[in-house]
Image (cartoon, rainbow, N blue to C red):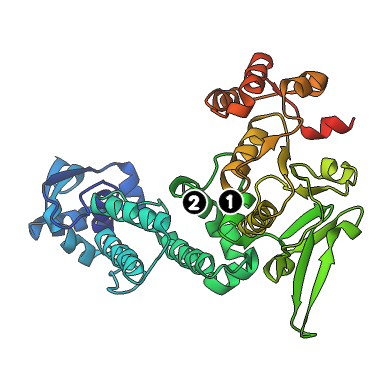
Amino acid sequence: MYIAEKIVEKCENSKRDWRRGASGNRTLKIDQEHYNECGKTKLIEEIVALKNKGLLSVKWITLNSDVESISFRVENLPRFYELQDSKPKEGSLNFQTKQEEADFYIRLIKNELAEGIHLGWIRDYYNYLLSRFEIGKILPKETKKLLIYIKCFRGIDEIIGSGTIMYKRVFSKKYLGNSKIFEEKAQEHIIQTIRKYWDEIDDAMDAQTILEQVFIKEYAQELEVKGPLCIEIENCALGKKICINTGDFLFGTVLNSATLENSRILPEQPEIRKVMTIENKANFVSAPYDEHTLYIFSHGYLSPKERDFLIQLQEVLEQGENQVEYLHSGDLDYGGIKIFEYEKKRIFPKLKPYQMDVETFDRYIQYGEPIKPETLEKIKALNVSEFSRLIDRILETGKGIEQESFLI
């Protein structure tokens, strides 16, 4: 029945009228669009039939011919659902009532919480969703995507718990049944939620970096190093352990994810005096080999596996006799400062900036690029003691300098 569907539509588009226990009188104005969609004769017949059943009252322009508006009680909404052409299917996803849909997702989220989601920030997000459902404000707007999102968060909880790195398309295939669904339908929302609810996420992280923090990789994880480092790799196929000194690779080498997982840093190390992380690839490649310096290409924010490896490195080095200096070289801008702050907080507590000072800034100011006003506001709010003078200089000029400028 056309008019029943319009009444249902009006109630479901409201904040509260669709909810269990709602009450009150509502009015629906009848206009030419309704006549065109339903046909005037059929529309008048439906209105008269519903009036005779006591389900609505009518304000006529011309009795039994032209209607100005109809009024109905919200308490009768279940009757209007029954009179629609499409009946609700209890227990399925083809819900016709918004209340049934809300009940379904409330049960689903509560089951997820009860069945052991371990990560606190996912639980916080689920509790937020429950509070929104309970006051009638269903989020996200495309509610049925919650089925996809919940599968993703369950997967993230599992892989972080196990410490297993998973390629993005493999993650999508395993948890969503198709290798492309995650990227097409879920990735944006998942990233927004991680950014909002997990306090480990830095606001300067891009989408790919955020996914890396939850062990979802776009491609194989690789840590590039240049300089002396002795590691022992377990070779299960040959049943023996292999010792490697990366210092033998004068131009640098790559430790992929499998190497990071199956190797340990040996307690006896070459005479490493400096460990330097470098944000940009060109600068890392151009850094001259030094038998006492271990360079690490940080590519921005280091992933969890890379962090664990470098924390292990620091523990070994701190037990040795050498006094080791920890340095970071990056862009002279908001991102560069945030990356330094992140590394110092989570990896190297003794970290110091290298070529990230006012003198370096002024030397390369001709290559400076304007910073957006909103980013300048973020820089103004930074409180990183190592960069107080540099921050003032950036704010004074309104410019930032990319590290690649040092190579010109």
**4 vs 39, nearest the viewer:** 4
**330 vs 47, nearest the viewer:** 330
- Residue found farthest to the top: 396
Quadrant position of residue 345:
top right
Camera sees residue 76: yes
Secondary structure state at the residue bearing disc 1: helix
Classify 10 Å Cα crowding around label 1: few (below 14), some (14-19), many (20 and above): many
Secondary structure state at the residue bearing disc 2: helix
In this rendering, position of residue 251 left or right of residue 230: right
Residue 210 numbered tag: 1
Residue at position x 63%, y 63% in the image:
168
- In the rendered image, the quadrant that contains the N terminus is bottom left
| Pointers 1 and 2 in contact (C-beta within 8 Å) | yes
Please state which amino acid type lies under the numbered disc 1.
Ile
Classify 10 Å Cα crowding around label 2: few (below 14), some (14-19), many (20 and above): many
In this rendering, position of residue 201 left or right of residue 56: right
Tally the numbered discs: 2
- In the rendered image, the quadrant that contains the C terminus is top right
- Of the image marks 1 and 2, the number of the one nearer the N terminus: 2
Residue 103 % position (x, y): 26, 64
**Vertically, is 389 above or below 21?**
above
Q: CA distance from mark 1 to mark 2?
A: 8 Å
Residue 316 % position (x, y): 68, 57
Residue 349 % position (x, y): 60, 43
Residue at position x 63%, y 50% in the image:
209
**335 vs 112, nearest the viewer:** 335
**Vertically, is 129 above or below 33?**
below
Please state which amino acid type lies under the numbered disc 2.
Ile
Residue 210 % position (x, y): 58, 51
Residue 194 numbered tag: 2
